[in-house]
Amino acid sequence: MAKSVKIKLEKDLEHISVDQLEPLQGELKTLSEANFNKLRKSMLDKGFKLSLHVWKNGGVNYLIDGHQRVHVLQQMAKEGIEVPPIPCVIVQARTYSEAKETVLLAVSQYGKLNKTGFQEFIDGEDFDLDEFDFPDITDDFFETPEQEADKEAKEEIEDDVPDIEENENPYCVERGQVWGLGKELKCDSCGHVMPYDETMEDQKCPKCGA
């Protein structure tokens, strides 16, 4: 049985074929190979559930949002997967510039995920979070308050440690001085290392004469 994308939206929207949709955002956003595959799998498994927004002008159907989904659908169609016309909401814009401004509104993210609210929202659900892409969720998003406190404490300790630039000579070694390394001596001028000998402490380096 041939694969196909199922449309899971009401049928009273205008349906437009993906090969008749013109991207308006150009290179504004990119899609990694990993996210391409994730989006492809999602639409095959769950269907197409969110409508596109389109601006009609001069006989051209310009995409306002949904560029990544349309890109994936177009590639799927080239693979022989059945992709029916997609439900679209028609957006009004007086000029091309206003339509581009609407694209920026579509890609803007004003709200940020709240950790507590997010955890409450998914509590009890069997969601596979790897299927989604949340820019706000970083590696430390799900840290407990105790882990956050430990992390902050470690950062404070690290901040208290002076950088080497603040004290480039912490051991107060003068250039040319022969100084002890356990049972060896090292010349700070040429780096020559020699066996420790008490009689050499006040003498010059035998290699460079410093």
Image (tube, grey):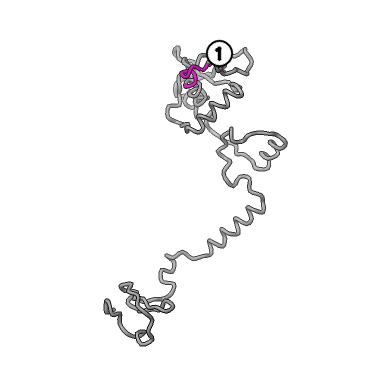
Write the residue at 45% across / 26% down: 25
Which residues make up the magenta segment? 75-81
Residue shown at the point (60%, 55%) measured from the top left: 151
Q: Where is residue 168 in the image (x, y as percent from the top left)?
A: 41, 68
Q: Which of 64 and 119 is in front in this view?
A: 119
Picture quadrant where residue 183 is located: bottom left
Viewer-proximal residue, 107 or 67? 67
Q: Residue at x 56, y 13 (%)?
A: 14
Quadrant where the image shows the N terminus: top right
Residue found at the far right of this picture: 124
Q: Which quarter shows the C terminus?
A: bottom left
Q: Nearer the viewer, residue 25 or 42?
A: 42
Residue farthest toward the bottom in the current orientation of the protein: 199
As displayed, is residue 148 above or below residue 172?
above
In this picture, residue 46 sits left or right of residue 185: right
The amino acid marked with disc number 1 is His
- Determine if the magenta segment contains residue 77: yes
**Secondary structure under the numbered disc 1 in the rendered image:** strand
Figure label count: 1
Q: Which of 178 and 66 is in front in this view?
A: 178
Measuring from the top left, give residue 194's x and y in whole percent. 35, 78
Residue 123, compared with residue 167, is above or below; it is above
Residue 104, how many percent across, how many down?
A: 50, 30
Residue 97 included in the magenta stretch of the image? no
Residue 187 vertical position relative to residue 50 in the rendered view, above or below? below
- Give the residue at mark 1: 15
Horizontal arrangement in the rendering, residue 6 relative to residue 201 (left or right): right
Q: Rate crowding at label 1 as few (under 14), some (14 to 19) or many (20 or more) other CA atoms within 10 Å.
A: some
